Amino acid sequence: EAAGSVVTIDPVAGAVATTGEQMALTIHAGHPAGLPLVYSVTGGPAGLAIAPTGTYGEALLTLDAVAGNIGEYTLTISVAPQSDPGQATTLTLPLSVRAANSSPVLEPIGTLHAKELETLDIQLAAIDPDGDPLTWSASGLPTGASIDPLTGRIVFTPHSFQAGVYEGIDITVSDGQFSMTETIAIEVADTNRAPVFVQMGDQSGREGTAISFRLLAGDIDGDAVRFAPLTAMPAGARFDGATGVFTWTPGYEQAGQYVLRFAALDSAGGQTQRDVVINIANVNRAPELTVENQAVALGETLDIVLTAGDPDSEDTPQLSIENLPAGATFDSATGRFTFSPDIGQIGDLVVRVAADDGQTRTVVPMVVRVTREPEGPVAILNITPSFPSRPGQTIVISTIADGFVPVASRHLFVNGSELALDSLGRASFTAGAPGKLEAVLIVTDIAGRTTEVRNSIAVRDPSDMTAPSVLLDIVEGAQLEDGAITGRIADAGLDSWVLTLVHAQSGREIELATGTDPLDGVLADWNSGAVLSGYYKLRLSAVDLAGLRTVVERSVEVLPHQPLGFRHSVTDATVDIDGVSLDLTRIYDSRPGGEALTASRFGEHWRAAWTDLEFDSLIAGMPDRALQAGTRLHLTAPDGTRLVFTATFETVEVAGVKTV
């Protein structure tokens, strides 16, 4: 036992000495400050001594036992600092002196098994035949392990990094003279420890804005860590279990608080859980307005219903119009807008339509076009190929539908049958028998206005090599008199024909009639007052589906006639030339004519009455052709009257010379 001083003495259960042999028992003591120590022993037989060895804190208790020493003794060993002998620590132990002694027997120990963080507590056992008290000792124990020298109890709680096998541990039991030693091993099994999360605070975000955070966890065993959600993830959220990264763009109906539980798991099955609180703030979205351009003509009333929506289902937007034009009404409860414009509002009016959900206001311009007359949408038909097709050939029809007011629908018909249009507004079909087809495109806008365009599609007969047969029932050089102009156009695959009157001098063409069907009879009704008198060519042209064309022309003369159309004269000034008054008068005549190229023209159909004679004859423009008897000359008098002169020649004799 030890008491009263800071000096410590290792316990010793007892000592044995046999006669004829020297007892040598090592006593271990120490002082925290490493002060030199002094040793003493009392209570033993004569010859018992204790003296320090060369090693600090170590002293050797010796006795050369003789027969006279046989007996039982109680020894008291005192150890004190050399500088303060009064501060001694004592150790009391029994000493048995006898003639003979038997060695203690240590029961087999073998390999001891322990686990990290769990206490190994094992009581060793030994037998001494003489019944002597035994002292236990051990060398090579791992850090933290200890053995009770008096009881032989081993206690060991391995820490987190002591897994492994510790070999070469010597366990010794001694009766103070003889001892027995067994070399053992302690095998410490790894105790898996769950991962540890790195602390993180609550997370915050907003609807419609991405939020991201990363879970962090470490494992004291160095195991790889993965993560797993233990609660259902919010809709649209993603979690990467390998990296611990959570990403989410909350929808606009997902405001609120979310408590998500995650687990950190190591490869040995260790698991730690933690909750992450996510607060998503509500974001108000602006109301949505869909307005289209509108059109209204004078005399009409535009009557539409405006609507607004809100992506936030709990909000109901209120409609209003910031600049309601004159003549318009608006009902904010129903969204009904009516507008009856007046003539001063012709043009484009920009009406600002607003929707307010109480937090956010959306304003969208609506353009209302006011026109004098209703204007329909634009409708265009393009046919490929643009030339006549062959039977069996694919014909592609491309449509264009557009307009200031958005288009609501478009429909394509070929000979009355509707064709389906693709996303690009195209349709195709296979050409059948030779002939003509009619394509009709009908486009309707959201205001209900409709535009219809038509185009013909020609399918030619590849075996047709004959041009149309064309005949005019008028002789060359005839006068074109009032009445019917007759003729004949014949062809099984006729595409079209046209009858034109061409001014002989200027080449200006006047279309008299046109058609697409064969004809035998009246081509056009003619009135000579429709044009200025003069010389023309009557031309009849016909083309078939194969592109073969026939043209027949007849030179004709148109005599003056009561003019048709509109005539007007304006006198700009009157000048006096040597006593003669000359009116500077401009005359307008709506009738088409030769339109002689004179410098005095003031615009189409206008002429200067004092200089522009609008001269026309068969020899006009032909300087190498002489005037002949009977040749007629057409010209316009200053008052606008159309005159005709016929050339005649007389021979007279002057001074004996005949002159024409």
Image (cartoon, grey):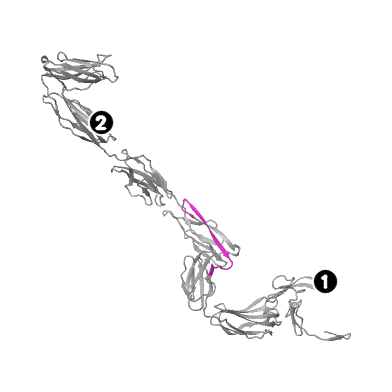
Q: Quadrant of residue 466?
A: bottom right
Q: Nearer the viewer, residue 530 or 376?
A: 530
Residue drawn at (27%, 14%) of the image: 84
Residue drawn at (83%, 74%) of the image: 580
Number of marks present in the image shown: 2
Under circle 1, the secondary element is: strand
**Residue 132, image x and y in percent?**
13, 23
Residue 657 in the figure: left or right of residue 410: right
Residue 95 in the image: above or below residue 198 = above
Tell me the kind of residue under disc 2: Pro
* Residue identified by numbered label 1: 576
- Considering every residue shown, the one lying at the far front of the view is 20
Res. 339 visible in picture: no
Which disc number belongs to residue 142?
A: 2
Report crowding for label 1: few under 14, some 14 to 19, many 20 or more residues within 10 A (C-alpha). Answer: few
Question: Closer to the N terminus: mark 1 or mark 2?
Answer: 2
**Does the magenta stretch mainly form a helix, a strand or a loop?**
strand
Which quadrant is the N terminus positioned in? top left
Q: Quadrant of residue 344?
A: bottom right
